[in-house]
Image (cartoon, rainbow, N blue to C red):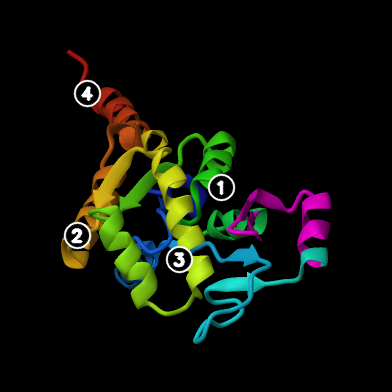
Amino acid sequence: MATPANASDDFLLLILSSPSGAGKTTLSNRLRSHHPDLRFSVSHTTRKPRPNEVDGREYHFVDERTFEEMIRLDAFAEWACVHNNLYGTSKKEIELARGGDPWHGVLFDIDYQGARQIRAAYPEAVGVFVLPPSLVELERRLRARGTEDELTATRRLEAAKGEIAHYGFFDYVIVNDDIDQAYYQLRGIVFAERCKRERHAALCERMLLEGRSTTPST
């Protein structure tokens, strides 16, 4: 019989956060392609979809009235206002992942405010902060992607300075100078976290008990 996800030692709550333009969405997509057992937590947001974004895939796009009603109903594990738009993680996303196979974890693509709320509710969650190699490079990336106007790009760059100030909250920091290298580091974090002693302590103790019960008496 398959082991339920909520009883699995390797169940992982992984938070991926970064300033806008640092590359966390690209890293998140690559990680999901190699770790399909990590359920991607699709956030709710009041911002408008970008070109090629699909409702229910990148985000659940809702209006402010719907979002505020979800707040009233305590439906979010975390929510925050970011760049004048509301973003939130539904508690249902985590409940679905804990329901059993094929899921053995949840991947959160959220900002530092959401990360703090997730860690407060789920202290076992692991936080990874993605940095650009420099603010100059971050500005270049923001302007190169062409999804924001000049005012929005400037506002995101200014916000990035404040977001970087919260790097100390996270367990790991990845500098995304080269996307392949950054991805290898992120994947290494997943493997390392799933090998941590405390995740396998129960198994070790069970084996010790079994060993004692089968030791021949003298």
Residue drawn at x 64%, y 65% is 44
Residue that badge 1 annotates: 114
53 shown above or below 59: below
**Closer to viewer: mark 1 or mark 3:** 1
Residue 83 on image: x %, y %: 58, 58
Q: Nearer the viewer, residue 211 or 193?
A: 193
Residue drawn at x 47%, y 78% is 147
The boundaries of the magenta stretch are 66-90
Decide which of tag 1 and tag 3 comes sooner along the chain. 3
Q: Can residue 73 be seen in this view?
A: no
Considering the image in quadrants, where does the N terminus appear? bottom left
Q: Tag on residue 177?
A: 2
The amino acid pointed to by label 2 is Asp
36 shown above or below 125: below
Q: Tag on residue 215?
A: 4
Q: Tag on residue 102?
A: 3
